[in-house]
Amino acid sequence: MHLRISTRLTMWYGLTLLILLSLFALFCYLFFHASLHRDFDRHLSHETRQLMPYVQFAGGSPAFSSLDELRSVAYETDGVFGTYVRLLTPDGLVLYKSPNFAEHSPLKVRIPGDTVAASVSQVWEGKPARSMYTPLFSAEDALQGWLEVTGFEWSLHQELYRLRLAMIVGIVLSVLLAIWGGSLLARRALQPVAALTEAANEIRVTNLSARLPTRFQVRDELTELAETFNALIARIEASFERERRFTDNAAHELLTPLTTLSNSIEIALRRERTPEGYRDTLRTMMEEVEEMTGTIRGLLQLARVDQLHELPRESIDLGDVVSEHVRRMQRRAAREGLDLAIDVTPGVFVQADRGRIGEVVDNLLDNAIKYTPVGGRIHVRVVHDGNEARIEVMDTGIGFDAQQQSHLFDRFYRADTPEVQARHGSGLGLAIVQAITQMYGGTVEGWSEGPSRGSLFVVRLPVVVPYR
């Protein structure tokens, strides 16, 4: 069904109301119909009680005696207000019939199967009639015949007809009014949807700052839906902005060493040089190539992490992995004149991949060694704290301020200070640390009391029970 939601809601509302009203009307009609029959039966019973004292048995057959003393004249009245009376034999033969039968065609006898009083409806001369049959017993409780009292139900059926007509008209009008009102209410209730649709059509790749409206008259499911979509759009906008900065920074980071290479080659080709001069040029070119290689390697690492929906996992002893990678870095730290120490809590297990956690440790240590002056100290700890494991890397290096702290994990970010710019780097190390940590359900944070006052980086990962 290619119908609008408001139309479908209105149709379902109207159909539901039609069914409910029809069932209610049917119940009321059947109840009223049965009530009218009971009232008419009480009328026939009253007439029967009036006639019973005048019934006598002559020669074993029932007959009326002194009927002219009966005050009721209903048995003499013709038409819908008349009562038609007959005395019947046990077999149904007519022994007596009231005078008002004279103007009518014969009425079919329908004696009940049991010898108990019963009412029977039938059509007489094209009109509904109802007869009450009362058994007549002798003093010896022998069935001597039947007293039949009949009346036309025409007025009763007229009432039922008018009731049916009123119910049908009422139901139709109620449903039509309900559909009209439901349509208005549905359109009004769905006005926020139209507003959301219009606002959504305004959102483009070039205009991701636009948001869906959330201030409606009430807070309902549409408000929650709009807020959810706004959060999604915000994430998409942040992703686009991150990718734009990523592209700009990647181009800049790769263009700078390429420019240096081009300049070095151009200078070397201007005139003949000594072998030592060519070696100096080649060394410069090699440094730039190494810088580009580091940048590309970092990009590949990030690309591999971003493309994975789930990194490999196994139960690993975090202390063993960290200790192994710290030992590999201790020789480099010694060459830089640094003291690299480690303090590990044994038996701290996490669900992760040894190689990926190794990348986290290597990048943190690389930054600490790179930006800590000669004679400085680096202290690595593995701590078990409740439901989390922590890797702490503390150094006495150049530190950073609050503004720099907010950008630490941005891709290609390198602080614009002489201490940072003097060292080669791609600005991807901490971004890689954050990407891997978040994939394993953890977090990473960095603190510093300010420039030249060292720094502390903490990686938090969920602890698991080790596999036995």
Image (cartoon, helix red, strand yellow):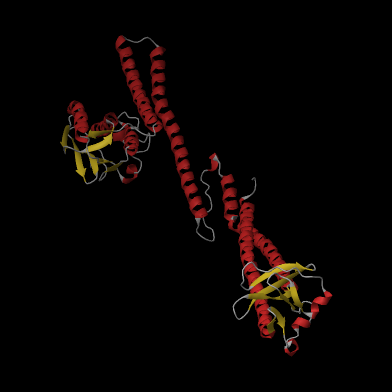
Left or right of 385: which side holds 264?
Answer: right
**Residue farthest to the front?**
59
Q: In this orientation, which residue lies closer to the viewer: 317 or 169?
A: 169
* 327 lies above or below 81: above
Q: Position of residue 230 (x, y in %)?
A: 49, 48
Q: Looking at the image, which residue is at 55% across and 44% down?
A: 203
Q: In this orientation, which residue lies closer to the viewer: 235 or 137?
A: 137
Q: Looking at the image, which residue is at 62% across and 71% down?
A: 115
Left or right of 128: which side holds 314?
Answer: left
* 149 lies above or below 25: below
* 47 lies above or below 441: below
Q: Quadrant of the C terminus?
A: top left
- The quadrant in which residue 153 appears is bottom right
Evaluate whether residue 396 shows in this view. no
Q: Quadrant of the N terminus?
A: top right
Q: Looking at the image, which residue is at 46% across and 47% down?
A: 231
Q: Position of residue 39 (x, y in %)?
A: 65, 76
- The quadrant in which residue 428 appears is top left
- The quadrant in which residue 262 appears is top left
Q: Position of residue 353 (x, y in %)?
A: 28, 31
Evaluate whether residue 413 shows in this view. yes
Q: In this orientation, which residue lies closer to the viewer: 348 or 375?
A: 348
Q: How many marks?
A: 0
* 357 lies above or below 163: above
Q: Position of residue 103 (x, y in %)?
A: 84, 75
